[in-house]
Amino acid sequence: MSVKTLEKTIIRTRDVSVYYGEKRAVSNIRMDIDRNSVTAFIGPSGCGKSTLLRSMNRMNDLVPSCRVTGSIEVDGTDINSADVNIEGLRQVIGMVFQRANPFFKSIYENIAFAPRFHGLTDKRKLDEVVEESLRKAALWDEVKDRLRESALSLSGGQQQRLCIARAIAMQPTILLLDEPASALDPISTMKIEELVMSLKEEYTIVIVTHNLHQAARISDKTAFFLMGELIEYNDTSTLFTTPENEKTEAYISGRFG
């Protein structure tokens, strides 16, 4: 799957619903996500935000009972059409999960594994990919002398940045982050937030977070979900200061959730 245009909108969803068996987890979502921006999905547990996120690179295909209706377009291509190569799609749309999941390999091999699998065998070029990816993930200076050590020797925050570097190594256009800092201490969380804000110069980032302060700090736009529905979607500053929907105001003011 290749980038076709440079329009402002890079992801467009139209009437997207996601079902697990007969249960509808997400209902008729319509939204446009801007290129080179950070979009935050917020809402209480079980509101559908992670389900929608996983639909954006077809991770929900791994759940046998799951089906998606409506359309999700990335640069004009409906990613759910039969002729879309899922492996190619996930190179364009990388994903990082809530808990760091480094491979049981060295730091170097965590980054080099996927590029090598997809045919990059030149050692010099692999070295360049590893260094560039770790630099973009703000991790190079911390691990450049430890590349042959196990990735499991890293701290939790470092492991999460390693997972971001691993996604970057495949040269994606979009990064999907599913609560990437929820299991981290405040200092590691700050580093992840700084990283997200710097990466939007090159990537479009969609992040699921339970942390309202985090959404307010790092995102350009915020989408508030409740019981599978998109309640409000607006510029972050507007949504947090003058929300249009009373449900949004109740959630961000802490009256529920």
Image (cartoon, rainbow, N blue to C red):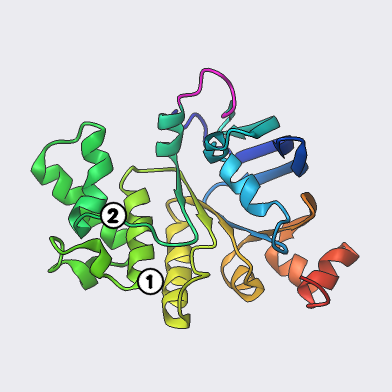
Per the rendered image, the range of residues in magenta is 79-85
In space, the residues marked 2 and 1 are separated at their CA atoms by 16 Å
Amino acid at the residue labelled 1: Gly
Query: Which numbered marker is on residue 157?
Result: 1
Residue 135 in view (yes/no): yes
Say few, some or many: other residues with alpha carbon within 10 Å of mark 1 (under 14 / 14 to 19 / 20 or more). Answer: many
Secondary structure under badge 2?
helix
Residue shown at the point (41%, 31%) measured from the top left: 87
Q: Which residue is drawn at 54% across and 62% down?
A: 179
* 72 up-or-down from 107: above or below: above
Mark 1, secondary structure of its residue: helix
Task: Specify whether residue 82 is painted magenta.
Answer: yes
Disc 2, disc 1: CB below 8 Å?
Answer: no
Question: Quadrant where the C terminus lies?
Answer: bottom right
Predominant SS along the magenta part:
loop
Instruction: Choose the circle earlier in sequence order: 2 or 1.
Output: 2
Residue 133 marker = 2
* Picture residue at 10% right of the left edge, 45% below the top: 124
Question: In the drawing, does residue 122 fall left or right of residue 30?
Answer: left
Picture coordinates of residue 148, whole percent (x, y): 13, 60
- Could you tell me if residue 242 is visible in this image? no
**Left or right of residue 60: residue 162:** left
